[in-house]
Amino acid sequence: MPLAAEPQIVLACRDVHYSYLDRFPALAGVSLDVHAGERLALLGANGCGKSTLLKVLDGLVFPTSGTVHAFGRPLTEDGLEDAQLSAAFRSRVGFVFQNADTQVFSPTVREEIAFGPLQLGLPPDQVQIRIDEVLALLEITELADRTPFQLSGGQKKQVAIASILVMNPQVLLFDEPTAALDPRSRHWLIELMRTLAEAGKTLVLATHDLERLPDVADRVLVLAEDHTLVADGPTATVLDDRALLREVNLIHGGS
């Protein structure tokens, strides 16, 4: 019986360190591989470096030291200054920020969703087809001509996600995706993430929500408050390790 092929590594970090203003550590020697098609959670208390790690994987910030590779190529500041390389990377990796207000800025929802593919130079007629498809997929066609200030928090999150999905990325990065959402919006988002995973998308999310973790991730990386990576394992295994969760300040006392 032939051996199963090793899953493709789409994103990789090796001994990544990052400090804000060269004085405030956020990541300390983090190494990881993200495999194609997996649902990976970055778990840890507030301030441990989860969001910074997502930004490193998205090429929004660059390591103080260490290396990052995306789809087998080095991900560097110099590399992303090349328009062709940058467009190729941005079309394959999408980032959904925790606060949708930082992501939704265009006069209307339709213009917001159009922004990314137009920036990549897609023909306008193709962009319109993509917009209509993603509006239908997310069941938000009725929002198309609204302005951002007419949207609820949950609707803004939907539009932020639509603006990424319209690019049809292979990898989606989510920063605290269920934070501040009402129960209906939270359920909608978890179901969407499940659908995307079933379609073969790679999902990486930063969270400290233990309750929802089994719904959104199959594998978990745990960051400690000293910004190091202290665990990597299946979701159930990590959640069963109460000593670890206490150590990284995700539960307390006798929980």
Image: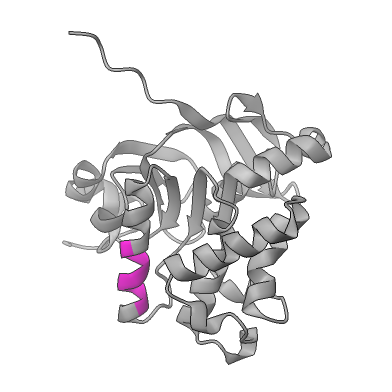
Q: Can see residue 81? A: no
Total numbered labels: 0
Q: Position of residue 117 (x, y in %)?
A: 69, 56
Q: Nearer the viewer, residue 144 or 17?
A: 144
Q: Nearer the viewer, residue 183 or 169?
A: 169
Q: Residue at x 82, y 34 (%)?
A: 78
Q: Residue at x 54, y 78 (%)?
A: 156
Q: Position of residue 79 (x, y in %)?
A: 78, 33
Q: Nearer the viewer, residue 43 or 8?
A: 8
Determine which quarter of the picture holds residue 17: top right
Q: Position of residue 150 (x, y in %)?
A: 59, 91
Residue at the top extreme, as displayed? 1
Q: Can see residue 190? A: yes
Q: Residue at x 65, y 86 (%)?
A: 147
Q: Residue at x 47, y 27 (%)?
A: 9
Determine which quarter of the picture holds residue 238: top left
Q: Is residue 245 above or below residue 176?
A: above
Determine which quarter of the picture holds residue 186: bottom left
Asked whether residue 233 is drawn in magenta, I would say: no
Q: Quadrant of the C terminus?
A: bottom left
Q: Is residue 132 above or below residue 167?
A: below
Q: Quadrant of the N terminus?
A: top left
Numbered range of the magenta stretch = 185-191
Residue at the front extreme, as displayed? 125
Tell me the chief SS of the magenta region: helix
Render colour scheme: one colour
Residue at the bottom extreme, as displayed? 150
Q: Nearer the viewer, residue 200 or 69?
A: 200
Q: Position of residue 103 (x, y in %)?
A: 64, 69
Q: Is residue 210 above or below residue 57?
A: below
